[in-house]
Image (cartoon, helix red, strand yellow):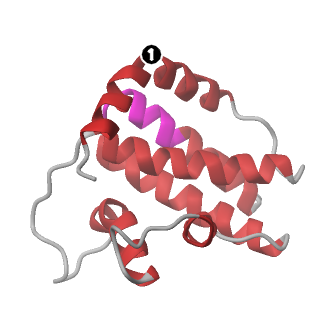
Amino acid sequence: MKVTKIEAAGQQLDAAIDHFLKEQWVPAIHCAGAAEELCSGEIEKHGGKKLLDDLWEKHDFSDLVAHKKDYVKVSNLFRDWVKHANGQHPDGIEIEDWHAFGIVMRASIAYGRLRKLGVAPPREALDHLMRWFSENEKRLNEFVESLPD
């Protein structure tokens, strides 16, 4: 079976969303990380930037971190923890739904950028994720508002 990077990204995104909706955080994070990586490569081929790079340039994160490498490290903490075995990560980690949601959303946004470029087809799984988001929006907003300034 021959598959393109965009098709592989779409399948990984579908799997990430499916795992997320089943509350299976580890495979959701893992698949979303793979989807985002594949999408980022395709976006760069079309002259765009990786999502985290783009966000770093457009927003001021200086109240959280001083350097871009620290921003990327924190942003990828859960993704890297579930994917890599190294001495830099703790043996165990507490993963909550919003950790998985953030990474699944990053992959979804990256895939959406490919859609805007006209190189990726629609994904039904994104409709399911948006339904979940609308059902949980109040709880997510309350969480964001509870974060320290």
Q: What element carries label 1?
A: helix
Residue 32 location, x and y as percent? 49, 52
Q: Can residue 1 be seen in this view?
A: no
Residue 50 sits above or below residue 6 on the image: below
As drawn, is 114 to the left or to the right of 15? right
Residue 93 location, x and y as percent? 14, 57
- Single out the residue that lies furthest toward the top: 135
The residue under label 1 is: 135
Residue 140 location, x and y as percent? 36, 31
As drawn, is 14 to the left or to the right of 132? right
Residue 135 location, x and y as percent? 44, 16
- Which residue type carries mark 1? Glu
Please give the name of the residue rendered at 31% of the width and 73% of the height, measured from the top-left corner.
Answer: 84
Residue 71 sits above or below residue 79 on the image: below
Please give the name of the residue rendered at 55% of the width and 67% of the height, measured from the top-left corner.
Answer: 52
Please give the name of the residue rendered at 41% of the width and 41% of the height, measured from the top-left corner.
Answer: 101
- Single out the residue that lies furthest toward the right: 118
State whether the magenta stretch is mostly helix, strand or loop: helix
As drawn, is 76 to the left or to the right of 47? left
Determine which quarter of the picture holds residue 20.
Answer: top left
As drawn, is 104 to the left or to the right of 114? left
Q: Specify start and end residues of the magenta stretch as a single range.
A: 15-23
Q: Is residue 16 magenta?
A: yes
Quarter the N terminus occupies: bottom right
Please give the name of the residue rendered at 11% of the width and 70% of the height, measured from the top-left corner.
Answer: 90
Q: Is residue 128 visible?
A: yes
- Single out the residue that lies furthest toward the left: 91
Residue 98 sits above or below residue 32 on the image: above
Residue 112 sits above or below residue 67 on the image: above
